């Protein structure tokens, strides 16, 4: 009955993409403000474009190499028939993901000056421009994601007459292109943004004593560019991958649970319904003229909560009609709800640990009184403590979705429950991502307002919008990590299913099977090593910016007096080159390790690796993101006049914390999301190779 | 044939303990130096005694409570017959472990002034006193450990006619007392030592600008006391537990592999042979009068390497005669060797990452040039990177010992291989621990030399000895972590065996079994949470010392001029009270979590918990210990005159790194060792309860 309804995927995609076009038109109607603002915005835009162009050119080469490898692999006898589509799906995944990032960044760099100008006219206007810009990103991601999946379903189903089982086991391999692109976007963007930020702060704020976003700082444009390429394009690619990954994993899990077309259709339909719910939610976001953070946050929250409730409500008939004939529909519904609720809870507790309206960050700010060492210790301790609730929430979601979906009787059904929980969590991504991508736009708007000398009042409004952006960025990160963990688990289970279908005898999933156990150890190691590499990459890249900024301060006459013009382009270019160079090693690691572990330890070792990297990587990502977020906000709390305020010794200590937190929260932490998913998708794609050749 | 040879355990214990007595007599013959030195040494001694007394009184109460709980549990119908010994073995384990810590601390506090005085007379003399003191600790630990085990074997075997299988499955529960005592010693001692250290540094070095170990600092005695209660007593209890745990786990694994008395005897005999090898090794430790670190380190290394080679050589006939009749003796031999080699390798690479003679720490020191933030980022990155090799080494040891011992054909045999590898790694503990416990003595000696104003030359020698102590402390920590991981794995497998013997049907060890999977998540979380709690405990305790030291500087007239006497006792007392108070929560966590997880998620959840906490805890412990060690040595490297030396901005940045590293390397990192073992032993003891009552 449902197998001929897959066209609704096109409807969902069209709705999302049309809404994105509509929103971007709305944004473009606003004025970009004064000439000075236009000039600054143009500089940021051209820097971001230059970066993305260089990044895509670099990635293109790697895509070609991997495409050829996949092509060679695909036509080997030990590959399934439809595996020959994998190389092509790898390309479409990469292109769509890159496109989502590109569009998101385009609109973000077009909106920053417009937001500043709109904030000049009123707070609500500012919020509307920034949020509309964010929603372009959000809906582009979900629209392209659903489009990619729907197109492939139609090609395989109608073009090649594939049945449900084949689609499930083939399409789960289609996520690697998106993962791949996401990795480069996140890691490269993360290195760029933090190298620029740390470099600008270390020389500008600390050494020269000029304020943040001061136009005299040669790295200030690079810093603003960084917000766009890291926080917008990187975040977009990351969540595109989670979104697509969770749906594809559910296809595979539906197949092995024996749900056929019903299960596949359920995952897709939930995505479409989520788009509509998110779309409706956006209409509830509006605020008055109060700069109070709680009011503003309430405005954004209202939209996301309404979307979640609508998606939950729509899941009831969906589960009933689609799944009622093949399994307990209530179980499927509960699984979806557990994912939705888990996403909301993780977002909330991320905010609790990182916002200065709550106790943990306030207490952290207090530790600045005894100097930088104690605020570092305090932040690390806070971050580690904050792993507790997200892990319990994800754990509970796993258990609830598994057992509710019938895992107690039939494990395959339970595992489908975990997959559909991930889909549930991500179903309203359109609006969640919109509130998240809103942040960097507001941040940039603040920078432009500062650089172009807009009045005190405007700064106050953009600061209010930016402060809100920090909170939504934190909750967005929590959500991204939580969904990555659940998606990675769904992918892990699909991997096992895939192997089982090919050669059930080689599986020994007992935790006492040494290759598997050692695999878990290696997975934990991979998470730590990857974090170390991304962090030291930021360190090295920032070092080169520091040297360059110092050089400009020394050599450009009148730069400090505002009569000499700093050379912004060189800093942008330096960041771009550093990021491109530094992202190679960590990225390679994510691709090579699962293949090597597979060839040495076999499929059981890979299963261990996936579990280890997912679990330790999840904990590590939460730790790093939250510690970084809390340091950032502790600093902002002091800057707001608490604890002797700006310029005090306490503030200096807090700046050290913030600087340490920068690569934590914007490079290593978020990159771990991609790592755990990419390792899974790489393992899935190379599973046949590993089954055919392995040592243990 | 071997079942009546268990008396050799008494021979081994006697040898070790007599050697300890002999060494302590040797130490006591040395002079304690001038009256001033005696006074200072007496102050440290009385502080350490006061602390330990309070700690034991506090622990006694908890022991009584747990003893009663165990007693109630032991006489329940669902417990095995011999389980009624568990409560009593819990007591003996605690007493022996406490005794080992007590004796080690006694001799350490008796040797510090003697080492300073001996160094006054010559470097080699100084080394001999300090090392002899360390060897008292080392051999007391192994002597008491073997004694405890041998006594219980005789009681059960001859008193209650228990067969091999019963002894294996019962005695594995006997390790909890030692674990328990070790936890309090490590956590309490770790909090004490770092609260005093951080407190003394923050006010003395940073605020008042007086040097380290300056007698005007009111926290200076507490700082020296801390070295003894944390690094000596805590480390001793930690390794006592690993030592006993690995042997007891091997008993259980030998039983389930069907090796009967032979397997049990093999583990015990390896311990005895290791004692003799270690004993011989100590005679090769001597040095000339060069203060060159490499020469000194070579002197210590020679002893440990000779002991390892001797133990390896002795393992050949042992494996052949004892195991030859029941399995492939070569396999058992290879397993033992893999453990021995892994221990040496982990020690070596810990040194590589933390000693300033190698590139990583030198590079880290360079990052101080751009301030505290970059050295923190650099240290965290270094620590994370350093997890790589230890994990690969442990992974390789697991695979080699498992497959060599025949795990490919019979998993039970392979798992015994992992157990005996742990025994192999720890067999020469007598001398490894001696080189480790030597460190705090040399450190204290340096402090006493400073405080009592001994000449420049003596300081130089004690500095050389202390520098060496830092390296051995680092390698010792690496070794402690590596052995803890291997022991914890052996305990994990014993746990599974134990459950299997009672109710095989409830086990589902597949990694896709959600309770097990969620258990791994919770294990990872427990490691992070525990680290967070111990770290913030240090922060709070240090804060109270800071307040007190500031008060004394303010209120005591003439304290800065040296005419007023600081009130050392109050600081010692404050540290004692803080440590006792702060250790409760993290300790409780380690005991309550495994029981609660068991009651909710059942035995499979517990298995996941154990795997998760072992693996993530291991990575986290290596990360924290090595980052801390590297920061410490980067600071020392700058103090030695590199990078503008003491007092420069670089040095200030490095001091921040060192202060952050203090709780990393001396509290949280080492405490994780205990955590991973204690969670295992608690799970083992409460396994019957969990089998009888569980939710999932």
Image (tube, coloured by chain):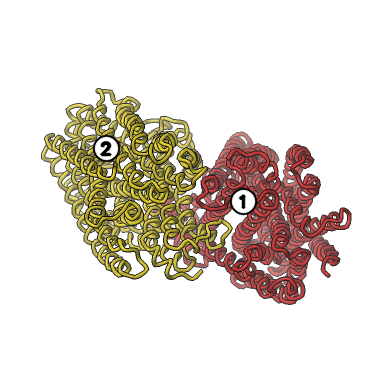
Chain colours: A yellow, B red
Note whether B281 is above or below B141 in the view shown. below
Q: In the image, which disc is placed on residue A549?
A: none
Check whether the beta carbons of the residues at disc 1 and disc 2 lie within 8 A of each other: no
- Judging by the rendered image, the residue that carries numbered circle 2 is A275
Residue B580 percent location from the top left of the image: 67, 39
Considering the image in quadrants, where does the C terminus of chain B appear? Answer: top right
- Say which of A444 and B469 sits in front: A444
- Say which of B481 and B236 sits in front: B481
Local SS, label 2: helix
For label 1, the crowd category at 10 Å Cα-Cα, with few meaning under 14, some 14 to 19 and many 20 or more, is many
Note whether A504 is above or below B563 in the view shown. below
Q: Is residue A353 left or right of residue A248?
A: right
Please name which of the two marks, 1 or 2, marks the residue nearer to the observer.
2
**How far apart are the two marked residues, 1 and 2, measured between alpha carbons?**
45 Å
Residue B463 percent location from the top left of the image: 62, 62
Residue at image location 78% in from the left, 55% down from the top: B166
Residue at image location 33% in from the left, 26% down from the top: A298
- Can see residue B563? no
- Can see residue A336? yes
Q: Is residue B662 left or right of residue A42?
A: right
Residues at marks 1 and 2 on the same chain? no
Considering the image in quadrants, where does the N terminus of chain B appear? Answer: bottom right
Note whether A399 is above or below A180 in the view shown. above
Residue B300 percent location from the top left of the image: 66, 69
Q: Chain of mark 1?
A: B
- Judging by the rendered image, the residue that carries numbered circle 1 is B676
Q: Chain of mark 2?
A: A
Q: Is residue B10 left or right of residue B468?
A: right
Note whether A536 is above or below A411 in the view shown. below
Residue A573 percent location from the top left of the image: 22, 57
- Say which of A562 and A582 sits in front: A582
Local SS, label 1: helix
């Amino acid at each position: 009955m449902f197998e001929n309804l897959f066209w609704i995927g096109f409807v969902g995609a069209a709705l999302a993409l049309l809404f994105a076009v509509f929103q971007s038109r709305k944004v473009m109607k606003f004025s970009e403000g004064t000439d000075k603002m236009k000039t600054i915005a143009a500089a940021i835009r051209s820097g971001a474009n230059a970066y993305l162009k260089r990044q895509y050119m670099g990635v293109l080469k790697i895509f070609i190499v991997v495409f050829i490898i996949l092509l060679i692999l695909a036509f080997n006898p030990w590959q399934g028939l439809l595996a020959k589509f994998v190389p092509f799906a790898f390309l479409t995944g990469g292109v769509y993901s890159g496109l989502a990032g590109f569009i998101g960044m385009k609109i973000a760099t077009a909106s920053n000056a417009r937001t500043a100008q709109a904030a000049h006219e009123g707070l609500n206007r500012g919020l509307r421009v920034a949020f509309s810009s964010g929603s372009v990103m959000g809906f582009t991601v979900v629209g392209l994601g659903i489009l990619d999946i729907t197109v492939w379903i139609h090609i395989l189903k109608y073009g090649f007459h594939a049945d449900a089982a084949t689609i499930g086991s083939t399409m789960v391999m289609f996520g690697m292109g998106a993962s791949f692109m996401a990795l480069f976007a996140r890691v490269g963007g993360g290195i760029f943004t933090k190298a620029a930020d740390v470099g600008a702060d270390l020389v500008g704020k600390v050494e020269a004593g000029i304020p943040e976003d001061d136009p005299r700082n040669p790295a200030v444009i690079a810093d603003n560019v960084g917000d766009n390429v890291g926080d917008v394009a990187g975040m977009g690619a990351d969540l595109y991958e989670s979104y697509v990954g969770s749906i594809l994993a559910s296809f595979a899990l539906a197949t092995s649970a024996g749900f056929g077309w019903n299960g596949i259709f359920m995952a897709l339909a939930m995505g479409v319904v989520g788009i509509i719910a998110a779309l409706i939610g956006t209409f509830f976001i509006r605020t008055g003229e109060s700069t109070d953070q709680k009011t503003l946050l309430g405005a954004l929250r209202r939209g996301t909560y309404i979307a979640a409730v609508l998606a939950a409500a729509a899941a009831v008939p969906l589960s009933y009609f689609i799944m009622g004939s093949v399994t307990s529909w209530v179980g499927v519904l509960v699984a979806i709800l557990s994912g939705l609720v888990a996403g909301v809870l993780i977002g909330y507790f991320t905010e609790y640990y990182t916002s200065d309206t709550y106790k943990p960050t306030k207490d952290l700010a207090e530790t600045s009184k005894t100097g930088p060492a104690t605020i570092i210790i305090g932040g690390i301790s806070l971050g580690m403590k904050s792993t507790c609730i997200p892990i319990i929430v994800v754990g509970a979601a796993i258990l609830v979705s598994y057992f509710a979906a019938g895992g107690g009787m039939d494990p395959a059904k339970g595992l489908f429950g975990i997959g559909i929980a991930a889909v549930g969590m991500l179903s309203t991504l359109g609006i969640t991502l919109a509130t998240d991508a809103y942040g960097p736009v507001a941040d940039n708007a603040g920078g432009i307002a500062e650089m172009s000398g807009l009045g005190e009042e405007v700064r106050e409004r953009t600061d209010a919008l930016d402060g809100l952006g920090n909170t939504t960025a934190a909750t967005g990160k929590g959500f991204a990590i939580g969904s990555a963990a659940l998606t990675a688990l769904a992918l892990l289970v699909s991997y096992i299913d895939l192997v089982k279908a090919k050669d059930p005898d080689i599986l020994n999933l007992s935790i006492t099977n040494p290759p598997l156990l050692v695999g878990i150890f290696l997975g934990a190691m991979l998470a730590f090593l990857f974090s170390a590499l991304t962090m030291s990459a930021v360190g090295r890249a920032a070092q080169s910016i520091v040297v360059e900024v110092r050089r400009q301060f020394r050599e450009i006459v009148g730069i400090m007096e505002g009569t000499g013009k700093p050379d912004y382009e060189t800093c942008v270019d330096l960041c771009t080159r550093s990021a491109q160079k530094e992202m190679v090693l960590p990225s390679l690691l994510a691709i090579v390790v699962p293949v090597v572990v597979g060839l040495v330890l076999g499929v059981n070792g890979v299963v261990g690796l996936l579990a280890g990297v997912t679990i330790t990587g999840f904990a590590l990502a939460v730790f790093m993101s939250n510690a970084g977020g809390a340091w950032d906000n502790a600093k902002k709390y002091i800057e707001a006049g608490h604890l002797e305020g700006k310029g005090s010794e306490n503030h200096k200590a807090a700046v050290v914390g913030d600087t340490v937190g920068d690569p934590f929260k914007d490079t290593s932490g978020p990159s771990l999301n991609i790592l755990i998913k990419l390792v899974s998708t790489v393992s899935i794609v190379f599973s046949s190779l590993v089954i055919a050749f392995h040592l243990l």
